[in-house]
Amino acid sequence: MESERLLLRPWNEDDAEALYQYASDHRVSELALWPQHTSIDMSREVIRNIFMPNQHLYAIVLKDTSEPIGSIGLVPEGFEHYATDCFEREAGYWIGHPYWNKGLTTEALGLLINYCRESLHLDSLLITTDTRNSASMRVAEKCGFKYIGEYVYEGISGKAFRLRLNDRQTPYQ
């Protein structure tokens, strides 16, 4: 998937150093709700054991530099933070701190939305965010997601947003 500034592509083990650069930043890991990376080897293991097996998880790559600066994709089924409906999946994303507030995550989410609508034929997408992550909420809202409720997952309060992708009749608005 490609936009003006970005390429979304599968992760590979050669991306471990770039992943470590951003995933070792506590500002990123804290809001993304995963452990801060402590070594390039840890990042390589995450790529090998978590990222690569997920066929719908992509590196967000700057076209100008070919550098992976974040990740976006679908949460594996069974690991969602909020209950999903039939033909609905939860999406997740993060981007390195130097790239916050530049519109890149919104651009990447637009690509994922089109992929989920055109290729996966999903009815809707969910986005869940930590209640402290106002930037992630803004990204969801810019892409048309509507707030649907609050939740608690593993003791952390969050907010859920939904985007309808087609006109099929579903039990929600």
Image (cartoon, rainbow, N blue to C red):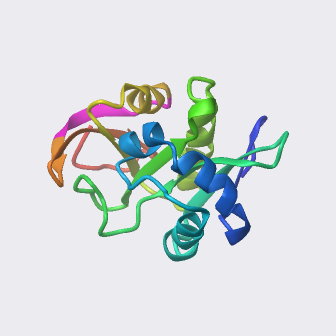
Instruction: State the image coordinates of residue 12 (x, y, percent, origin top left).
Output: 69, 69
Which residue is located at x 56 percent, y 41 percent? 95
In-front residue for pair 14/79: 14
> Does residue 144 belong to the magenta stretch?
yes
Q: Would residue 77 appear left or right of 156 to someone viewing this image? A: right
Instruction: State the image coordinates of residue 170 (x, y, percent, origin top left).
Output: 28, 50
Residue 51 in sight from this viewpoint: no
Which residue is located at x 54 percent, y 73 percent? 45
Magenta stretch secondary structure, dominant: strand
> Does residue 75 belong to the magenta stretch?
no
- The span shown in magenta is 143-150
86 shown above or below 163: below
Quadrant in which the C terminus appears? top left
Which residue is located at x 61 percent, y 63 percent? 40
In-front residue for pair 127/64: 64
Residue 136 in sight from this viewpoint: yes
Which residue is located at x 26 percent, y 54 percent? 81
